[in-house]
Image (tube, rainbow, N blue to C red):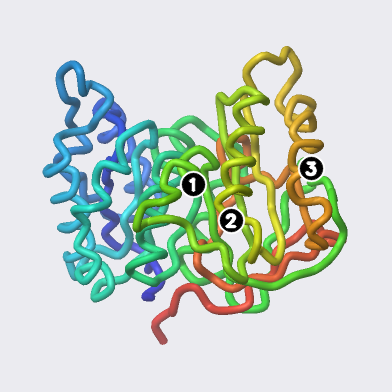
Amino acid sequence: MPALRPGAKIAIVAPASAAPDASDQAAQWLEDRGFQPVVMPASRSRLDAPYEYLAGTDAQRLDDLHAAFAAPDVGAVWCLQGGFGSWRLLDGLDFGLLRQNPKPFIGYSDITALHLAMQRHAGFVTFHGPMLAQDLLAGKREPTESHALAMMSGQIGQGAWIQPPPDTFPVELVAGTASGRLVGGNLALIAALIGSRHDIDTRDSILFFEDVNEALPRVDRLLSQLAAAGKFDGVKGVVVGSFTRILGTRMDDVQAQSLLYPLVLERLGARGIPVLAGWPSGHGDPNLTLPLGARVTLDTSRAALRLDQPVTTRAG
């Protein structure tokens, strides 16, 4: 997949919820960093009730994605916002078009539905990372921005270690090292697609998951659903990302997410695979970019992931 070049055109898309007031600000943000923004039409839209949570009709949002990937002069496709609605697009995606035009695609949260479908049917690496309105305009702290740009531009290559910044504190729940394809995203979306043709493939994988605004009993149920569906059976290692705004607690996010760890260990602790928790990717701050679909090695003693393949190709 071609790396993002300095000065390249970047398409701003909104495959899920609407954030029309942020599209021009996002374009300015990209311009300030030397890129040429291409604001796709649906990113400026919001539907009327009862679909006011969507940025344009399904057809409009699909058209934006297809046009962004098909355009030979667009170097990356960057999501403006998460929210709700990406799953509505999956059966309409032209995976042949995507396979023929691979380019960096970045987003997370509800965008997990698109990541899972692209992994399953298009087969190139996509980036679980910060969105323009939801993270970058909101001022999430470094290395949120620099890590995303370095990952997409090929500055982080094969053999590089992805390490959390020193002011974050991953927790080694089960010690060990393991290698596999990095898969996953938002836990609720992973569970929602089980049984569909876009279902996550966890065989020989390093599984990553994160979430926001969930109560502990619901997280327990989601993990139980994955276990019942056999989604932990072929997993080589697990990275638990940021769990923020956990409902029903009055603790800060760092303290509250530690309440999840017994639930994780109940499902995974006896499987003999390494488990690292508190990884700063997802709805927390900072939000490190992860290359979904790439082969990585998890080393819990280093609290780090090693990239075992190139994820983009830099010209020259």
Point out residue 219 in the picture as x, y percentages from the top left corner: 63, 32
State the residue position of label 2: 231
Tally of numbered tags: 3
**Residue 170 appears left or right of 185:** right
Q: Which of marks 3 and 1 is nearer the N terminus?
A: 1
Dot 1 alpha-carbon crowd within 10 angstroms: few under 14, some 14 to 19, many 20 or more: many
Label 2 vs label 1, nearer the camera: 2
Q: Which of marks 2 and 1 is nearer the N terminus?
A: 1
Q: Does the residue at mark 2 contact the one at mark 1 (Cβ under 8 Å)?
A: yes
Mark 3 element type: helix
State the residue position of label 3: 266
Point out residue 299 in the picture as x, y percentages from the top left corner: 79, 65
State the residue position of label 1: 190
* Front one among 129 and 277: 277
Label 3 vs label 1, nearer the camera: 3
Point out residue 302 in the picture as x, y percentages from the top left corner: 83, 61
- Tell me how far mark 3 sits from mark 1, CA to CA: 19 Å
- The three-letter amino acid code for the residue at tag 1 is Ile
- Tell me how far mark 2 sits from mark 3, CA to CA: 15 Å
Mark 2 element type: loop
- The three-letter amino acid code for the residue at tag 3 is Glu
Residue lying at 62% horizontally and 71% vertically, measured from the top left: 204
Residue lying at 52% horizontally and 43% vertically, measured from the top left: 186
Residue lying at 82% horizontally and 59% vertically, measured from the top left: 300
